[in-house]
Image (cartoon, helix red, strand yellow):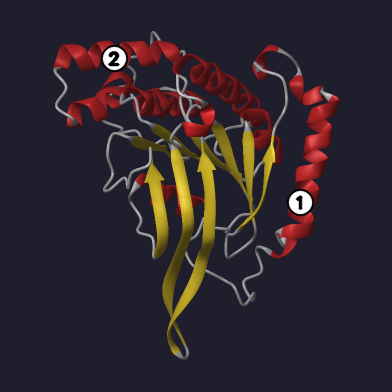
Amino acid sequence: MAPLAFMTEALEVRDLTKLFFRQTPRGWGGFLVLDHVSFKVRPGEFVAVLGPSGCGKTTLARILVGIESLDQGEVLIDGHAPGPPGQDRCLVFQNYGLFPWRTVAQNVELGLELRGVPVNQRREAARKYIDLVGLTGFEKYFPHQISGGMQQRAGLARALSTQPRLLLMDEPFGAVDAQMRTALQDQLLRVCEVTGATVLFVTHSIEEAIYLSDRIVIFSARPGRVVEEVTVKLPKPRYASDVRSDVLFGEMRKRVTQILAERTDYYRAGDPTSDSAVLHTD
């Protein structure tokens, strides 16, 4: 294996800037959503993007996966421009994104089916990832027949089945209750441990960011700027102990909360009268 210093970054974002436009009394106006955002993600690293609602986190995820354009800057995956949406990266949405007319297994197979993978191969891959996320026995169920947490696990299995170089997750556990959210977080950590996936995880939950990630990239309120990166030095595997009760966890939560309060205009982020108001950011 090459020394870490010479390894290509799994993801590099350089001076990424994004504007949206809307009609104003004075004509069309551009509203800055992301302002010269730069950060890196190493292979196998789990990085959380944390910031107040409306700071452009979702827009960032959409740009990285290739379904939204950028206005300035550069995105590199494994040192190369990624081009249009492809199998090298996959986005897991908050709303599950399952087709209601397809069973769990058929939904998991979808990415492979679109790539033209033979039926037997894609069914074998689907079984593997369905088992990995704990859904064995539910292969023939339709989305409306399973819980929200199970639907999200099916969405994760579908993303993993294509073996993406970069797994992007946009607040995937935001729509489930607190108990299920904790269970899904543990499941995700186990899956990442087995697959070695590189993950960029969008969240506005401080505790979720600390619990899951190796590093947290903290965004300001609109327009989104990187104000600080925080390394999380909690022991692993985190699901194996009550790490949330650890003194270090409490200290980390206090530090991140303080950064959000002092450097991100967190408590004014929802003010629609702000001069930096933007459209469709998060």
Query: What residue sits 46% from the left and 91% below the top?
Result: 26
**Residue 102, picture quadrant:** top left
Q: Secondary structure at mark 2?
A: helix
Q: Earlier in the sequence, mark 2 or mark 1?
A: 2
56 w.r.t. 134: above or below: below
207 w.r.t. 188: above or below: below
261 w.r.t. 213: above or below: below
Residue behind mark 1: 259
Q: Secondary structure at mark 1?
A: helix
x and y percentages locating residue 279 in the rendered image: 48, 67
x and y percentages locating residue 62 in the rendered image: 40, 50
Residue nearest the viewer, comparing 258 with 281: 258
Query: What residue sits 23% from the left and 25% below the top?
Result: 112
Say which amino acid is labelled 2.
Answer: Ala
Give the left or right position of residue 208, taking residue 98 as reference.
right
Say which amino acid is labelled 1.
Answer: Ile
**Residue 96, picture quadrant:** top left
**Residue 189, picture quadrant:** top right
Query: What residue sits 48% from the left and 40% below the top?
Result: 94
Residue nearest the viewer, comparing 235 with 116: 235
Does residue 243 show up?
Answer: yes
Quarter in which the N terminus is drawn: top left
> Marks 2 and 1, Cα distance to the nearest angstrom?
43 Å
Does residue 135 show up?
Answer: no
x and y percentages locating residue 225 in the rendered image: 59, 59
Residue behind mark 2: 125
Q: Which mark is residue 6?
A: none
Give the left or right position of residue 37, taking residue 267 as reference.
left
